[in-house]
């Protein structure tokens, strides 16, 4: 079809040129006659261009009637516009359905542009976060002023959510989750976790209350046992042995209660606490001294390698508990004459606290569960050393609060290495 139309147009041009030349030749001006014909043909093309321009500007006008190549142009553009309109309508329908489905969610959903300004949100965000129409285009950190959220929004990391108390509704707990996409745009989803939080709080309160209730009778029992042991004259040896075993188990129970209370205190601390600069080298010197005192009876060597002035932002009391737990465990589970190496160094990935020993090691099958509460790789060894099974759970909880990670490497017969890694954004250096 296209080839036939092209031949017809060529024939028409040739005939028009020949006619112009013939008429001009008879009039004595052949070239002038040809020029008149060419001008006429050009005028026709300009007319078609004008009709095309007018049609393109007026989207409601029908396809102009034409012939030849121009008819193909008009028809081709018409089909392109029709397909584009259909695709656009389909896309708009999908967008409308997506918006409708997001609007029906109970979770608050909000889009934040690359500059941190609020761009769009669903009705649940108005109920949970109090967003209003006048807030469009405003910085989201001006609307949600919780310090922990501001730190989370600016610095991340976004691989874990953030739990905070609602500013708008007293007693309601929210969890923020942010996903980056495009050119640093962010999708923010907010969940109402009040019910889950209350259930978790009930569990924490139960553990804390039971631990407190156990503390008093254990203190009384330990006191009487200590008194009986001090006044051992006249007591048969078999009873002295029984008293010793009871005192040992009472001490173990006391350690368990103390660890439970410590874990409960860590869990009940607000997540939006303001961190402070922790002078880790100074703290590690004290922990090292305590470890040396504990290791001396076992003829162990405890070394400390520390980068001067390397500090972190965090909670000193919590970090002290975590670091002390790791060092104490290494001393407890390393045989006599062993070596325990404590290091605190920084590199391009952040700051790292590691405790390495050359003890018996741990089978790799146990490594994924070591930080679970009351989980023991070797129950017999833990009982012999007085372990409670909560030390690594405490360490894990402290590191989670500091957005840090715990890496455990161990090999049977060759020892273990526990490494706590902190993000570069938490590093502070003493000047």
Image (cartoon, grey):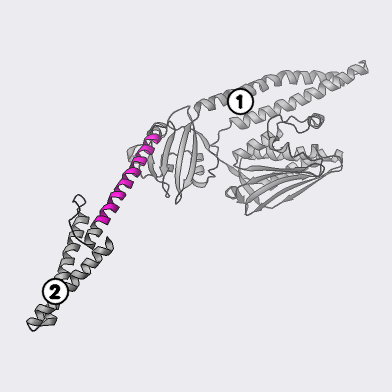
Q: Between tags 2 and 1, which lies in front?
A: 2
Residue 130 in sight in this render: no
Q: Residue 359's spot in the image, x, y percent?
A: 81, 41
Residue 51 location, quadrant? bottom left
Instruction: Kindly identify which residue carries mark 1.
Output: 204
Would residue 183 appear left or right of 293 to someone viewing this image? Answer: left
What is the count of numbered marks? 2
**Dot 1, how many residues are within 10 Å of its Cα: few (below 14), some (14-19), or many (20+)?**
some
Residue tagged 2 = 37
Residue 127 % position (x, y) = 39, 31
Q: Which residues are magenta?
A: 75-102
Residue 231: % across, % down: 88, 19
- Residue 296: image location, x then y, percent: 85, 40
Residue found 67% across the figure and 48% down from its top:
352
Q: Is residue 276 left or right of residue 366?
A: left
Is 195 contained in the magenta span?
no
Q: Residue furthest bottom?
A: 28
Q: Is residue 76 magenta?
A: yes
- Magenta: main secondary structure equals helix
Left or right of residue 46, residue 295 in this image:
right
Question: Which picture quadrant has residue 248?
Answer: top right
Quadrant placement of the C terminus: bottom right
346 lies above or below 296? below
**Circle 2 Cα neighbour tier, 10 Å, few/some/many (<14 / 14–19 / ≥20):** some
Q: Distance from label 2 to label 1 (Cα)?
A: 98 Å
| Quadrant housing the N terminus | bottom left
Q: Looking at the picture, tell me which residue is in the foreground, 135 or 257.
A: 135
Secondary structure state at the residue bearing disc 2: helix
In the image, residue 132 above or below residue 68: above
**Is label 1 in a helix, a strand or a loop?**
helix
- Residue drawn at (67%, 46%) of the image: 280
Front residue (pair 205, 307): 205
């Amino acid at each position: 079809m296209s080839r036939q139309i092209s031949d017809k147009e060529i024939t028409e041009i040739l005939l028009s040129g020949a006619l112009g030349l013939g008429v001009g030749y008879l009039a004595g001006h052949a070239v002038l006659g040809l020029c008149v014909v060419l001008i006429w043909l050009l005028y026709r093309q300009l007319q078609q261009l004008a009709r095309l321009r007018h049609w393109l500007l007026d989207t409601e006008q029908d396809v102009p009637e034409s012939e030849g190549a121009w008819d193909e142009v008009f028809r081709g553009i018409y089909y392109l516009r029709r397909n584009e309109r259909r695709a656009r309508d389909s896309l708009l329908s999908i967008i409308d359905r997506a918006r409708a489905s997001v609007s029906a969610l109970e979770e608050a959903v909000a889009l934040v542009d690359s500059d941190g300004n609020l761009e769009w949100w669903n009705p649940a965000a108005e109920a949970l976060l109090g967003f209003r129409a006048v807030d469009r285009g405003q910085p989201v950190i001006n609307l949600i002023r919780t310090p922990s959220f501001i730190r989370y929004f600016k610095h991340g990391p976004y691989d874990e959510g953030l739990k905070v108390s609602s500013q708008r509704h007293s007693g309601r707990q929210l969890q923020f989750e942010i996903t980056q996409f495009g050119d640093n745009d962010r999708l923010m989803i907010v969940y109402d976790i009040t019910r889950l939080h209350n259930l978790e709080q009930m569990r924490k309160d139960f553990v804390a209350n039971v631990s407190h209730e156990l503390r008093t009778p254990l203190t009384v029992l330990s006191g009487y046992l200590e008194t009986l042991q001090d006044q051992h004259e006249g007591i048969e040896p078999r009873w002295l042995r029984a008293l010793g075993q009871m005192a040992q188990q009472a001490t173990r129970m006391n350690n368990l209660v103390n660890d439970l209370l410590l874990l409960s205190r860590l869990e009940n601390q607000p997540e939006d606490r303001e961190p402070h600069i922790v002078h880790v080298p100074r703290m590690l010197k004290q922990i090292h001294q305590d470890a040396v005192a504990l290791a001396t009876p076992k003829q162990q060597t405890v070394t400390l390698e520390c980068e001067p002035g390397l500090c972190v932002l965090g909670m000193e009391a919590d970090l002290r508990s975590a670091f002390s737990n790791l060092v104490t465990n290494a001393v407890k589970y390393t045989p006599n004459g062993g070596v325990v190496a404590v290091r605190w160094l920084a590199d391009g990935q952040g700051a790292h606290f590691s405790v390495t020993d050359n003890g018996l090691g741990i089978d790799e099958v146990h490594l994924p569960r070591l930080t679970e509460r009351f989980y023991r790789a070797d129950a017999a060894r833990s009982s012999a050393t007085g372990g409670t099974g909560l030390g690594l759970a405490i360490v894990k909880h402290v590191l989670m609060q500091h957005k840090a990670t715990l890496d455990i490497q161990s090999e049977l017969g060759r020892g273990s290495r526990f490494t706590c890694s902190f993000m570069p954004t938490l590093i502070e250096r003493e000047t």
